[in-house]
Amino acid sequence: MIAFLTAVLASGVRTGTSVLFATLGELFTERAGVLNLGVEGMMLMGAMTGFGVTWLTGNPWMGILAAMVVGGMMALLHAFVALVLRAEQVVSGLALTFLGSGLSAVLGSPLVEVRQVDRIPTWPVPFLSQIPVLGPILFDHNFLVYIGFLLVPLCWFWIYRTRQGLELRAIGENPAAADVQGIKVMRQRILYVAFGGVLAGLGGATLSLALTPTWVEGLISGQGWVAVGLVIFAGWDPIRAMFGSYLFGALRRLPIDLQNFARFRANPSLGYFTGMLPYLFTIVALLTVSIGDIGRRWGAPAALGRAYVREDRDA
Amino acid sequence: MTGGTVSGTVPSGRPRLRLEARDQPGLLTHLAVSLLLLVAALFLAGIVMTVAGGNPLDVYRSMFGAGFGSKWGLNDTLVKMVPLTLASLGVALAFRMKMWNIGAEGQLLMGALAASGVALFAVPPDMPQWLALALLAAAGAAGGAVWGIVPGWLRAQFGVNEIISTLMLNYVALSIVQFFVYGPWGERGFGLTPMFERNTWLPRLTEFADQWSALRGLTLHLGILAVPVAIVCLAILLNRTKFGFEIAMVGDNPDAARYAGVRLRRTMIIVMALSGALAGLAGMNEVSGVVHRLLEHISPGYGYTAIIVAWLGRFNPLAVAVVAFLFGGLIVGADEIQSAGISSLLQGVILFVMVSGNLLIRYRIRLRVPETLA
């Protein structure tokens, strides 16, 4: 049993890493007061680009880099349409998702044939990975998982302990007041939206270069949307985002982990139900924060989803 | 957006582009700008196709020919238009009150599942066809409605974000359909159920070829009649009833609506039920009118396309149907060139360009040289 739970948690951490990156990215975007529902599209483009560039260059880190650039560029498109042209942010984000799935399908069609590219290597941390239970869960992974470990506290520090983080929270809560303080609201928002896209691209490439090293149309299968949900679940807090992501990852891998049990192997139709779990989990996660007092304690950024136009300022 | 004019972020003193709100953009402005944007979208998508190694002109020509170029093409386009219109009207209804129901795909699947269950197990082969079809339609609408009520209730009661919940339920619905078609209802593990009895089939035009020979071979089914009915019903509901007025009011300003006595929760749940029911009917149309069985890939993403169609039709029922017709042709065209990717690419680019271009409809762009202060 312990061995099974260890395996579930270890694969949860590994699988959850891709959604963790995307969640952190969306968290910054929303903290800046911008809703970007294009995460799924940006992750798809990141996954396709990462896989394609790795195939072309033979270097998975080049793939990761390219995926981040493409994710950032996609996000800039959203920033332009939603912030500069002031289109409805929900619709612009949806459009970005459609665009990403279409673009990745067309541009990625030659990649479907490619069977194998170099993956991001796995590196068991010396000594630490030998610790029973904790070792396999935390210290026997590919490099991207460790990058995730580092990123979470960095994000936390940035948001809560730096001047930039204070400004970030200000433009998300009260852009007019931030503007009066001399904070460049528009410029910062665009930068954070782009940063969100960079992380979404990284999340997509994590999937296609570390977890399921292939490219197929629609590879992300809703994880971008899960990321948007997890941001709410996390109450816009990076630490909680991490737990949510790993929990999602564990549930996502559960159908495969359960194959170790004879009863599940004998009854494959159970797989359809275990396959629903990560999606139901996301709904339940949203429900728990809505019912509990968590939602009241950590509310959404007050200006989330609203364009800020200096000339329209009320005060 | 409260002010009449807004401007860019360029500091004053230099000539700058100003956006002036048009008072009431006329229909002609709408159409002209939309056409311009469509051309721009086709151009942009063409660039992508060229990069991907195709010839966009050839692609567009064969797609257009397949969708609209012949009697057969139009037939296929209309067949696709039926589920697309129904699902899009459902989405448009929800969007009208800013309920972002992006779960039409799941609602369509659940409608198809429910209608299939009735067709396979509840309809004896000797039941009159009209009754069987009515039962199937009711089941389809109910299946979709349930899948709309759940996120509607979660939103109304607990404030659970409906964008996420409706989308998650799409994947859950797909898993449920897969379970049935590969499991208890399946036939030899091919992911499809046995063929339904004839009395549950929506009649096709070709069945009337004895009276009108021109109809021979046309696969368009009587589900097409649901399109005008749904348009008229929805137009009346939205524009001529108190409930429709309340929906618009909630969409514009939920707080004002609540002070005016609108029961927000009830309205949300009913709207989501109706929205899901329309998508469910779309699913029933597919199983009963097109394939006559349930299969895993019953929908090529109608529910997702419906979101685009609803938005492009500006939530106006008649306009939604027109856009659904065009997008039906797009899907047929994509089938012809055997690339679903091209179809979703075009849909994405068109929506994106239209969303950005919305500015051109709402505002007039003027170059202004600001007067220097005396």
Image (cartoon, helix red, strand yellow):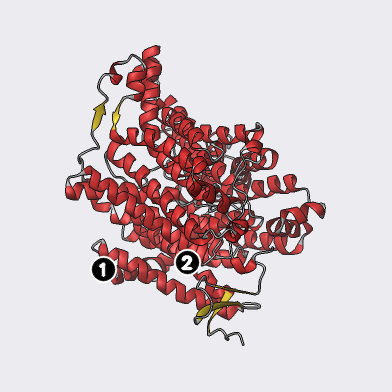
Q: Secondary structure at mark 1?
A: loop
Q: Chain of mark 1?
A: B
Residues beneath discs 2 and 1 located on the same chain: yes
Left or right placement of residue B20 versus residue A149 in this view = right
**Residue B171's x, y, as percent?**
48, 39
Left or right placement of residue B258 versus residue A239 in this view = right
**Compared with residue B176, is residue A105 higher up or lower down, i.e. above or below?**
below
> In the rendered structure, which amino acid carries the disc numbered 2?
Leu
**Residue A160's x, y, as percent?**
52, 40
The residue lying at 55 percent from left, 51 percent from top is: B282
Q: Secondary structure at mark 2?
A: helix
Residue B225 appears in the rendering: no
**Compared with residue B266, is residue B40 higher up or lower down, i.e. above or below?**
below
**Residue A230's x, y, as percent?**
51, 38
Q: Chain of mark 2?
A: B
Instruction: Check the picture and name the quadrant holding the N terminus of chain A.
Output: top left
The residue lying at 32 percent from left, 15 percent from top is: A131
Nearer-the-camera pick, A180 or A148: A180
Q: CA distance from mark 2 to mark 1?
A: 22 Å
Residue B55 is tagged as 1
Nearer-the-camera pick, B331 or A39: A39
**Compared with residue A64, is residue A289 higher up or lower down, i.e. above or below?**
above
| In the image, farthest residue toward the front | B374
Which tag is nearer the camera, tag 2 or tag 1? 1
Dot 2 and dot 1 residues touching (CB under 8 Å): no
Packing grade of label 2 (10 A; few <14, some 14-19, many >=20) is some
- Look at mark 2 in the image and give the residue it sits on: B326
> In the rendered structure, which amino acid carries the disc numbered 1?
Asn
Residue A108 appears in the rendering: yes
Left or right placement of residue B297 versus residue A310 in this view = left
Packing grade of label 1 (10 A; few <14, some 14-19, many >=20) is few
